[in-house]
Amino acid sequence: MSAYDVVVIGGGFLGLSTAYHLGKAGAKVLLLEARDIASGTSGACSGRAQVSEGHLDALNIRLIVEGMERFNTLEEELGLGFEWHRVGCLCLIKEGQQHLWNAWNERAAVLGKAGIEVEMLDAHSVKEAEPHLNINGLMGAALSTEGLLNPFLFCWAYACAAQRYGVVLRAHCPVTDIQIAGRQVVGVTANGERFVCGKAAVMCGAWTPQVTRLAGVDVPIKHTHAEAYISEALPPLLRNTIALADFYETIHGKPRAISVGVSQHENGTLVVTEAVTMCEEIHGWVSAWGLGGMASDLIRFFPVLGRSRMLRSWGRPTSFAPDEEPLIGWLPQLDNLYVASSMVETITAVPLISEWMAKDILGEELPVSLDIFSPARFYQPA
């Protein structure tokens, strides 16, 4: 029977990066992943390190600003490239959306004070910034500079770096039981093998409630089902990532909705997102209405892409808490079970938040309080 200081459950962005920092700090760490590394939502995302579309409180802005700074040296630190590069992002505002234009002007002012430049462009300037874009029906756009990376390589870079610090990675190792003694997690069973642990951390996105129930705790995480596809490699066509400025308004509370966005990666492929469905089941299916709707909207904005071919499509869950803030911290029902899920701008925050979470798990002092993300906010005091 093997014993570890910390067992991390989940082989995506949060689990791998936190395991890396735990191992770097000298902890004996085991990471368990039910399928392949990056096989869940982390590997299914577009690879955007967003800067302008998230929450505007001081903590989230700090995660964006300092997280982006960490990317300047992160490939060197981890010892593996993940196709990181800076790219513009155009959040499109349609005609008749004056309220949205006003809201983004206010957002630009707040972000600008924090050093995140957001420029408001009229339709003519949008055309100059993105020559192939059909600007008919557009009022303008908000332009910012964000990042783009390969999400599989990003996960793999953290996985390889973690292993160099002694972290044990076990893929295809689904957790089937969590043993409790009093208010303590004392062991985790996966693939019929029991692992003794001093602490456990559940970091598996929409699958988090399934895992915490093994410890007798329900966490209030829900999810939507998001679909995307990737194109064949194309000549350079897009100068910027394209998104709709009303993405969250478009999908919020809808049984199903499409808010098309597209990025062109360095290999020429387009990652096109996303068709969103409200559902209870976690699955990887795609729908005819989703793929067709995304393709139709994309061609409306970029007629030049009308003959491009789709190579692969997928669907994955996107988790969220009821108040749409991250869920990060110790579960109040147990003394040593940590959870982290439902980040707003996950990739951007990962280099910084994972270091903070590792410190939190090890009982070290943090440079900032994470109390606003604490799971305790959803539970009445005993």
Image: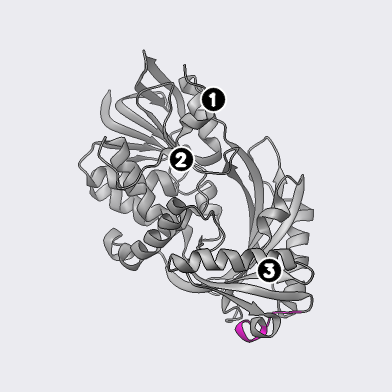
Q: Evaluate whether residue 245 shows in this view.
A: yes
Residue displayed at 57% across by 79% down: 239
Which SS does the magenta portion mostly show? loop
Earlier sequence position, callout 3 versus callout 1? 3
CA neighbours of label 1 inside 10 A, class few (<14), some (14 to 19), many (20+): some
Report, in whole angstroms, how far the alpha carbon at label 2 lies from the one at label 3. 29 Å
Report, in whole angstroms, how far the alpha carbon at label 3 lies from the one at label 1. 40 Å
Earlier sequence position, callout 2 versus callout 1? 1
Q: Which amino acid type is marked by label 2?
A: Ile
Q: Secondary structure at mark 2?
A: helix
CA neighbours of label 2 inside 10 A, class few (<14), some (14 to 19), many (20+): some
Q: Which mark is residue 101?
A: 3
Name the residue that disc number 2 marks: 372
Q: Secondary structure at mark 1?
A: loop
Report, in whole angstroms, how far the alpha carbon at label 2 lies from the one at label 1. 19 Å
16 with respect to 310 (left or right) = left
Residue 170 falls within the magenta-colored stretch: no
What residue span does the magenta drawing correspond to? 127-135
Quarter that holds the N terminus? top left
Query: Residue 72 in the image: x percent, y percent?
Result: 34, 68
Query: Residue 261 in the image: x percent, y percent?
Result: 65, 65
Q: Evaluate whether residue 266 shows in this view.
A: no
Name the residue that disc number 1 marks: 218
Q: Which amino acid type is marked by label 3?
A: Trp
Q: Which amino acid type is marked by label 1?
A: Asp
Q: Secondary structure at mark 3?
A: helix
Question: CB under 8 Å between callouts 2 and 1?
Answer: no
Q: Which mark is residue 32?
A: none
Earlier sequence position, callout 2 versus callout 3? 3
